[in-house]
Amino acid sequence: MLSKIYSTMSKNVFYTIFLLAFSINGNAQYKEYKISANGDTINVINQAGQKLGKWVTEMGELRGEPGYVEEGVYKKGVKDGFWRKYTIEGDLLAVEHYILGGKDGLQQYFTFVGSLEREESWKGYNPDAPYDTIAVYGTGSGEIVDYKIVKAEPYSVKDGEWRYYDPNSGQILYTVIWERNNIKKPTPPSVEEVPAETGKPKKIDKTGEMLEWERKNKGKKKVMRDGSTGT
């Protein structure tokens, strides 16, 4: 009976030592890492100084801005896949998607009480198309004389529809259409002119100078105000 107990204990000890040795050897390739509460290896930095795998980062309050926690995966030292941002209390603030460090696709942002605030559309670097074709222009002529194939660099541009919501009602206040960082279809009014609680343009109080300028130029066409007060 005792021999069986000792045999079982010996097997357990050997198994524990084996797992410990495996864990030490496995993490030896890391320059830095942390172990989460459930035993996962996170926040890994390899010997080359690159961030790898799952990361959980907490940022404290800074210059009056509240702190937050973000989590996601690093691949080859840059963000990749879905990343989520939370308040310190654990409320969801953002869901972002990355391809090799650049935002790609739909990004969503929420208020501190969980209401959808805006949705952004981005276009990221395509790892399946590692080369770009660029035009070569002639000297002084401005004409394309050749094309050159170069290695594409990771990038991220605003591309697609951006929606801004009233966090109280959930209704869309306005949208903006982007095409590779260029606004193609702005929907007035601008952000500053729309109070979230009404969704209506904010009334701007006119100064005496503005009213006087309008009185003098009433009925005139193609009048441009240059900022001078006149005499």
Image (cartoon, rainbow, N blue to C red):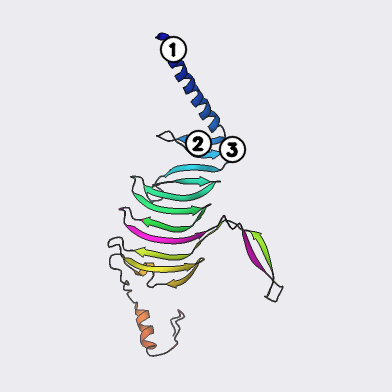
- Among numbered discs 3 and 1, the one appearing first in the sequence: 1
Of residues 176 and 128, the one nearer the viewer is 128
Q: Categorize mark 2 by other alpha carbons within 10 Å: few (<14), some (14-19), many (20+).
A: some
Measured as percent of width and height from the top left, residue 59 is found at 42, 45
Residue stretch in magenta: 110-136
Q: Horizontally, is 159 left or right of 114 in the view?
A: right
Residue positioned 53% across, 43% down in the render: 51
Give the position of the N terminus as an image quadrant. Answer: top left
Residue at point 41%, 50% (across, down): 63
Q: CA distance from mark 3 to mark 1?
A: 42 Å
- Of the two numbered discs 3 and 2 on the same chain, state the one appearing first in sequence: 2
> Where does the image place residue 210, in percent across and percent down from the top left?
37, 80
Tell me: residue 62, above or below residue 147.
above
- Does 156 sit left or right of 9 as displayed? right
Q: Secondary structure at mark 1?
A: helix
Q: Which residue corresponds to mark 3?
A: 47
- Say if mark 3 contacts mark 2, CB within 8 Å: no
Residue 12 position in % (x across, y down) = 45, 20
In what element is the residue under mark 2?
A: strand
For label 1, the crowd category at 10 Å Cα-Cα, with few meaning under 14, some 14 to 19 and many 20 or more, is few
Q: Looking at the image, is 91 positioned above or below residue 178?
A: above
Asked if the stretch drawn in magenta spans residue 83, the answer is no
Residue drawn where x is 56% and y is 32% of the image: 28
Picture disc at residue 6? 1
Residue 61 horizontal/vertical position (percent):
39, 47
As helix, strand or loop, the secondary structure at mark 3 comes to loop
Of tags 3 and 1, which is closer to the observer?
1
**Circle count:** 3
Query: What amino acid is labelled 3 in the image?
Result: Gln
Q: Which residue is mark 2?
A: 33
